[in-house]
Image (spheres, helix red, strand yellow):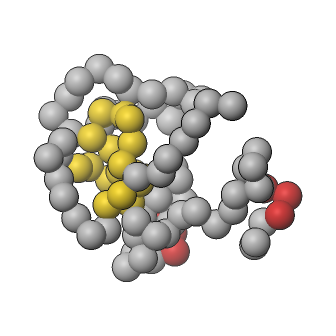
Amino acid sequence: GSAPNGSGKWGQQDLAGNVWEWGLDWYATPYNASCNNCAYTTPASDRVGRGGDFRDVASSLVSPYRSVYGPSSRSFALGGRCARTP
């Protein structure tokens, strides 16, 4: 509830910081920061995790912050978010 004007379509808020969010994207470097709502779907050696976890500093608890995870990575600090198309 810290940013009511920034709520998602269904009222969701404050989702960052629980666990790293396992993404659809494969890790690409250099990162194309100008890309708006894109997904890197060309297979590579690593996947992207976003948003930080409960052990991280505040600056990593934002969705643009990313980390590298191998496709077979397992961790108590790595999870997913269910999403749907409206």
Q: Residue at x 45, y 28 (%)?
A: 39
Left or right: residue 52 versus residue 2 is: left
Residue at the top extreme, as displayed? 42
Left or right: residue 80 versus residue 15 is: left
Q: Residue at x 62, y 30 (%)?
A: 85
Comparing 49 with 65, the one in front is 49
Quarter of the image with the N terminus in it = bottom right
Quarter of the view holding residue 25: top left
Residue 65 appears in the figure: no
Q: Position of residue 54 (x, y in %)?
A: 42, 76
Left or right: residue 40 versus residue 36 is: left
Residue 3 appears in the figure: yes
Comparing 34 with 2, the one in front is 2
Residue at the right extreme, as displayed? 5
Q: Residue at x 38, y 26 (%)?
A: 40
Q: In the picture shown, does residue 78 fall above or below 80?
A: below
Q: How many marks?
A: 0
Q: Position of residue 55 (x, y in %)?
A: 37, 79
Q: Position of residue 10 (x, y in %)?
A: 75, 49
